[in-house]
């Protein structure tokens, strides 16, 4: 059975400007489809059979190298003549994204359930544009997606099935690349600890959540290898995915079983 959950989120943002401080209040009415099941949530509808771009998602712990590999993959596919864009979640350019950014920088506090739903809303903000881009032939490389939202929130103790529910109906990736690194190795990399979630013990819990989420369709890549070796594995896997989408692999929706 599918139900809709509608709620409002209000938040005041404070910014420093040349003229002083600026305070802006936002109120969002968010509506998510929820499908309740005694077991796992599952929904996957075919949307298109036309030639299209591929939806490629990079996942992994903080500081595993996702941003570096996203950038390198973008350049590689462009060199091959593909139309491609690199996206990142959370998208901090939107109003919802600004609320998330403030939270991640430890400048504000939100209930765990509330911030989870804001992360999901941030992805929903881009859902229509994402589908339009893919159908027009643009391949999208996404740095973090729904799996991050579920992994991080469930690491806080939230029920994993509850965490999945707001993601139902978002587009399913054609390929998930998981850059595998131990929490201890990630913690040794530059910049670690700058944001709220970059704490070793918490990242260990996130790693366990990812292990629960991932399945045989994910491509697991050893992120401790030299950057060039990681890039080579990414390239080899992505080319087959892009080719399948060009040949008309249909779009589908989350959640994957």
Image: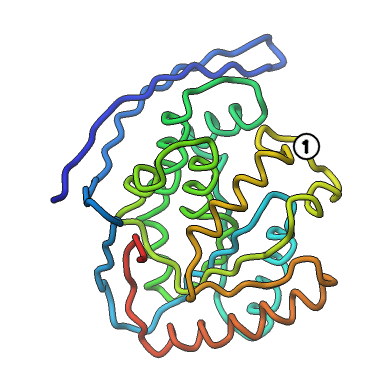
- Residue under the point 36% across and 50% down: 167
Q: State the residue in front, 214 or 80.
A: 214
Q: Residue furthest left?
A: 1
For residue 171, above or below residue 229:
above
Q: Residues within 10 Å of mark 1 (few under 14, many from 20)?
A: some
Residue for badge 1? 193
For residue 37, above or below residue 116:
below
Colour scheme of the rendered structure: rainbow
- Residue under the point 60% across and 47% down: 206
Is 138 situated left or right of 117 in this image?
Answer: right
Location of residue 35 in the rendering, given as x and y in whole percent from the top left corner? 22, 50
Of helix, strand and loop, which one carries label 1?
loop
- Residue under the point 54% across and 13% down: 23
Q: State the residue in front, 200 or 145.
A: 200
Location of residue 38 in the rendering, given as x and y in whole percent from the top left corner? 23, 51
Is 76 situated left or right of 123 in this image?
Answer: right
Give the total number of marks visible in the rendering. 1
The quadrant holding residue 200 is: top right
- Residue under the point 55% across and 61% down: 142
Location of residue 87 in the rendering, given as x and y in whole percent from the top left corner? 57, 57
Location of residue 32 in the rendering, given as x and y in whole percent from the top left corner? 27, 42
Q: Residue furthest top?
A: 20
Quadrant for the C terminus in the image: bottom left
The quadrant holding residue 177 is: bottom right
């Amino acid at each position: 059975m599918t139900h809709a959950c509608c709620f409002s989120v209000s938040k005041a943002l404070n910014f420093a400007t040349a003229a002083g401080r600026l305070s802006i209040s936002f109120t969002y009415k968010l509506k998510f489809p929820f499908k309740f099941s005694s077991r796992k949530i599952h929904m996957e509808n075919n949307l298109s059979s036309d030639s299209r771009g591929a939806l490629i998602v990079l996942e992994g712990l903080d500081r595993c190298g996702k941003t570096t590999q996203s950038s390198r993959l973008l350049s590689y596919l462009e060199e091959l003549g593909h139309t491609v864009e690199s996206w990142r979640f959370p998208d901090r350019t939107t109003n919802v994204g600004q609320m998330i950014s403030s939270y991640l920088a430890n400048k504000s506090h939100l209930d765990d359930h509330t911030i989870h739903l804001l992360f999901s809303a941030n992805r929903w903000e881009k859902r229509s544009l994402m589908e339009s881009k893919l159908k027009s032939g643009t391949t999208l490389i996404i740095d973090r997606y729904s799996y991050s939202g579920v992994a991080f929130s469930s690491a806080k103790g939230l029920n994993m099935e509850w965490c999945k529910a707001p993601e139902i109906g978002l587009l399913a990736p054609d390929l998930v690349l998981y850059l595998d690194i131990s929490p201890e190795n990630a913690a040794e990399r530059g910049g670690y600890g700058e944001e709220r979630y970059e704490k070793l013990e918490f990242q260990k819990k996130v790693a366990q959540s990812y292990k629960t989420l991932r399945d045989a369709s994910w491509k697991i890549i050893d992120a401790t290898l030299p950057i060039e070796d990681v890039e080579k594995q990414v390239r080899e896997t992505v080319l087959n995915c892009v080719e399948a989408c060009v040949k008309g692999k249909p779009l589908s929706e989350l959640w994957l079983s």
